[in-house]
Amino acid sequence: MDIARSLRAEARRANERRLLVLAGDPDRTRERAGAALDAADVPGGETTVVGPEAFLDCEHHEQSRAEELLGRTRTAVVLDAHEELRPDAVGRTVGAVDGGGLYVLLAPPLETWPEVRDGFDASLAVPPFEVADVTGHFRRRFVETLRAHRGIAIVDTDTDTVEQDGLTDPPPSRPVPSPTPPADAQFRPETYAQCLTDDQRDAVQAFESLRTGGGAVVVEADRGRGKSSAAGLAAGNLAAEGRDVLVTAPQYRSAGEVFTRAAHLLELFDVEFARDRTSEPQRLDVSGAGCVRYAPPAEAALLPDDPDVVIVDEAAALPVRRLEQFLDAPAVAFTTTVHGYEGAGRGFSVRFRDRLAESDHSVTDVSMTTPIRYSDGDPVEVWAFRALLLDARPPVDQLIADATPGTVEYRRLSTADLLADEHLLREGFGLLVLAHYRTEPSDLARLLDAPNLTVRALTHEGHVVAVALLAREGDLPADTRAAMYEGGRVRGNMLPDVLSTQLRDEAAGIPVGQRVLRIATHAAVRSRGLGSHLLSEVEAEFAERVDWLGVGYGATPELVRFWARNGYATVHLATSRNATSGEYSVVMVDPCSDDGTALATRHGEWFQDRIAAVLSDPLDDCEPDVVRAVLRASDTEPSLTLSEWEWRLIAGVPGGASILDTNPRPFRELARRHLSDPTDPAALSAREERLLVRKVLQARPWSAVTDDLEFVSERECMRTLGGVVERLTRLYGDPWVQEELDRHL
């Protein structure tokens, strides 16, 4: 109790947070937590317990619901980690503690905690592995950071021993002067009176550029800097001025602060406005003016009802392809967390900034560095960044600028290697963060502890320039394969799962493979063949030990061509878009053995058999260039078996003697044959191949195809397709078919 009292007093004096670790028997740590908070004078109404039991008279959530604290502020958060420690729960809860508050961690004895397997560890034990195969490296490192960082008190409640008191004797916090409103402000003055830091004032003023079309704003900040509040203040102003402001985020809770701040500002303006719901409003309508409304990313990307302004909160949690769609808005803002659980700001910068720069928007950049909830240099924030590697990043450009396939070393990075070299761990994990639109703290734990994962890298003078995260899949026992085939969920075996459940191949789980979960090359050395070199080294290492190498990802033409160049062939194209990425996922396989070849062959054939049918139904909106790339990446030689009547039907189209709608099937077979394995790749232009996809394979109306492919008229579109059919008929038809063709021309 004395420790808690002293920690809280010091935290309040410095406007910082402190962390109190209570380690020992579960019941005893829970009892001591209540006593500690009472001694520290923390009200129950300002406390949240996150864990399996509601042992205090306060708000309670399971660790799986830790996201409930996102965007909220608490004086104390108690994370009960006795039954499990979810890294994501740590990342989501630690930022909710306000300056002057306490973060309390309840844990087993620290000496033995890394050896204990808990509920989160069980989630890492993917078949055929068991929980005993999971290591405790993440928790061992976690404990080491607790002992190494300032501002963290550790108490052994079993022996009433204070291992460290966590006191730092900081100077008292200095009052932060209110920012001066900008002299040239265009938003109403009440707006800037709500800003708490100069950073927040500058961010709000940047949003003024959205009052007219053509502007784009990018706000980057760590968590707790007030970027969502700044967006909310701007949204309230814009709505009061008559603008229709569309707000989107990965989940509404991420954007909740935008609506809270916008509503509060409208109240200060003393204007009439209506909420669509009392709590968590997703629409604010200003009487006689504009509105602020929310839509999830997939819906918002369609720009419903033509908004004047779009605000994308936590933009780094969305993939680049989704973000690109918002560039069609008249004015758009992206706010993003630089280091955090919602995504990686660095990845957003590297992967999306080029697209933004190429757009017609005039871009204004704002960086927010000053914390609002607590003082700069807060020791708990410093600890969280280190423990969860929230600030992991690749090496600086200058260190690897000369890297080429001839200068790099292929390295098999064991967990021991990564733990022994913090720089190697940070560089490797930092690159993996860039490889995916959303990386969470749990990904670090998987990398260090999951028995099915391995890391391979290319290093240049000791620095990581390319990295691949691989997952062992398959080799499943008969009962697991049967359960999967019957619809049961099997963790960590994505490729066998898809082939078994969706494509009805119970034997797909027998061969063993390595799936490339993520692969990334440093931005400074891309387009030098390093990614392909890494994949070739991976294949050389694993080819004798597995049946297949595989990958599954959101399909874009560039990515499909990259994997095809490296020997991977299409076996499946998903028939529904990923809700977050907005892309259709493709599964590709590179066989390494006879069993792997058998698996790839039968699924390649099945893919060819069904693709024409699904393209005209669930995949009728798939981008033509994705379809072209996926078909071209098929390793299966496509058949073309048409009856005499079907050939006569095809031969009559160029001269106008017959029409496609009489029976689209033979035209689809001809298009599939050419797009998959063209006899003459130069026979058609890219636009003509897109025409085949849109009209023949996807059966889109002539008017839609004409507009989509920018033909002058439907007549020109039809005439072009007739010419395409003529060339394909001469390429693939027998002599008598060509005679039939010439008869009608």
Image (cartoon, rainbow, N blue to C red):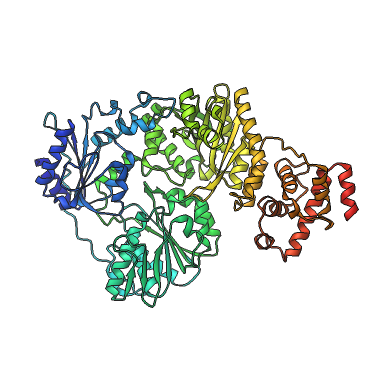
Between 168 and 657, the one lying in front of the other is 657
- Could you tell me if residue 458 is visible in this image? no
Q: Is residue 390 among what the camera can see? A: yes
The front one of 359 and 179 is 359
Direction from residue 107 to residue 441 in the image, left or right: right
Q: Indicate the quadrant containing the C terminus: top left, top right, bottom left or bottom right.
A: bottom right
Q: Give the answer, above or below, for where 468 lies relative to 723.
A: above
What residue is shown at x 67% (from left), y 45% (from top)?
612
Return the x and y of residue 680 as percentages of the image width and height. Answer: 78, 43
Q: Is residue 88 left or right of residue 667?
A: left
- Left or right: residue 726 versus residue 64 is right
Between residues 632 and 160, which one lies in front from this camera angle? Answer: 632
Q: Residue at x 23, y 64 (%)?
A: 177
User: Where residue 668 appears, x then y in whole percent?
Assistant: 71, 47
Q: 165 left or right of 217?
A: left
Image coords of residue 241 (percent x, y)? 39, 75
- How many numbered marks have been drawn onto this rendered protein structure? 0
Residue lying farthest top? 544
User: Which corner quadrant holds the N terminus?
Assistant: top left
Answer with the quarter of the image where residue 182 lies: bottom left
Seen in the picture, residue 231 relative to 737 is either above or below; the reply is: below
Residue furthest to the bottom in view is: 288
Q: Nearer the viewer, residue 501 or 562?
A: 501
> Where does the image place residue 674, in percent across and percent down from the top left?
74, 44
